[in-house]
Image (tube, helix red, strand yellow):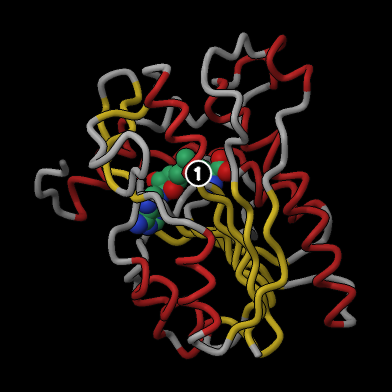
């Protein structure tokens, strides 16, 4: 069970994890936990971003990446010509991002309650909000999504990847990464233990997200569970669960 922890303490846990989520390094030096995002999640997101540009009839999109970490994902989006803003609550993650990202990429130090969500400069300004493994660490997810809705234009999408429950159930079984859950068969809250850095994690089914978004003026447009590519197991010496590691969902603001 989760012992009480405040937002600054959580941000500090992520400061301690900045070296693990080192997606800005050359491919061979990237930690397997971070490499999953690159090889499994990002390709799906890139494709959906292309579809969204077509849907809106624009060449390039305005994208907010929530929990941007070391920033490699937004660097690639910027290279494709999109206009991107990254937000993260970890100073150490942003320190890495600032070192190698082009200076015209805006990086914001803040969390899901950041004042940027009420800043008129961003009001209904984004075509897309992305979040790759950055939402399952948040207990108050409704506030987070209410804030996303404020800065998303009509027709804009929220596009995010979180752990599916089946991955957590299997990981608990093989005693990898996840521990101290409320249930081994229907886990909803517990910890991810990154070599001793224990971060509270909240596991939600697709039906939870459907209910929130469909009740708040959004339409569901995507639910996929991309498989690991075979080469990934070999190249990264993967010892974790082989159950799909990501549930990728997307909802459009009507
Ligand atoms: C697993 S890393 C993923 C980083 C990046 N999205 C990627 O694809 O590699 C999770 C990131 O979310 C950030 N994060 C977690 N909770 C957050 C919150 N409440 N507000 C802002 N950032 C948060 C962490 O600091 C970390 O950079």
Q: Say whether residue 94 is visible.
A: no
How far across and how far down the image is residue 119, in percent? 43, 85
Q: Quadrant of residue 125?
A: bottom right
Q: Is residue 15 above or below residue 235?
A: below
Q: Is residue 46 above or below residue 158?
A: above
The number of discs equals: 1
Q: Residue at x 61, y 39 (%)?
A: 100
Q: Residue at x 82, y 61 (%)?
A: 81
How far across and how far down the image is residue 163, in percent? 50, 44
Q: Tag 1, which secondary structure?
A: loop
Crowd band around label 1 with a 10 angstrom C-alpha radius: few (<14), some (14–19), many (20+): many
Q: Is residue 208 above or below residue 236?
A: below
Residue most extreme to the front: 185
Q: Residue at x 42, y 76 (%)?
A: 116
Quadrant of the image for the C terminus? bottom right
The residue that label 1 is drawn on is: 163
The residue at label 1 has a CB less than 8 Å from ligand 1 = no
Q: Nearer the viewer, residue 24 or 241?
A: 241
Q: Is residue 76 above or below residue 60?
A: above
Q: Say whether residue 178 is visible.
A: yes
Quadrant of the image for the N terminus? top left
Q: Quadrant of residue 135?
A: bottom left
* Horizontal side, residue 35 vs residue 172: left or right: right
Residue most extreme to the left: 4
How far across and how far down the image is residue 224, in percent? 70, 52
How far across and how far down the image is residue 127, in percent? 69, 77
Q: Residue at x 63, y 84 (%)?
A: 253
């Amino acid at each position: 069970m989760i012992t009480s922890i405040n937002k600054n303490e959580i941000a500090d846990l992520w400061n301690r994890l900045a070296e693990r989520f080192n997606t800005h390094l050359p491919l061979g030096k990237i930690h397997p936990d971070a490499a999953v995002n690159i090889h499994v999640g990002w390709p799906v997101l890139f494709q959906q971003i292309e579809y969204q540009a077509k849907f809106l009839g624009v060449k390039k999109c305005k994208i907010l990446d929530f929990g941007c970490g070391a920033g490699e994902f937004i660097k690639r989006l910027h290279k494709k010509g999109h206009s991107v803003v990254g937000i993260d609550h970890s100073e150490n993650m942003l320190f890495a991002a600032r070192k190698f990202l082009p200076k015209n990429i805006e990086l914001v130090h803040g969390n899901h309650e950041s004042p940027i969500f009420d800043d008129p400069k961003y009001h209904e300004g984004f075509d897309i909000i992305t979040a790759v493994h950055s939402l399952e660490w948040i207990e108050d997810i409704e506030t987070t999504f209410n804030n996303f809705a404020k800065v998303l234009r009509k027709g804009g999408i929220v596009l995010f990847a979180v752990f599916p429950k089946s991955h957590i159930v299997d990981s608990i079984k093989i005693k990898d990464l996840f521990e101290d859950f409320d249930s081994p068969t229907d886990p909803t809250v517990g910890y991810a233990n990154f070599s001793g850095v224990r971060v509270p994690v909240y596991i939600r089914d697709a039906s939870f997200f459907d209910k929130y978004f469909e009740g708040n003026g959004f339409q569901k447009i995507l639910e996929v569970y991309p498989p690991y590519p075979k080469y990934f197991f070999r190249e990264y010496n993967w010892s974790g669960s082989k159950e799909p590691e990501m549930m990728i969902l997307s909802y459009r603001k009507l």
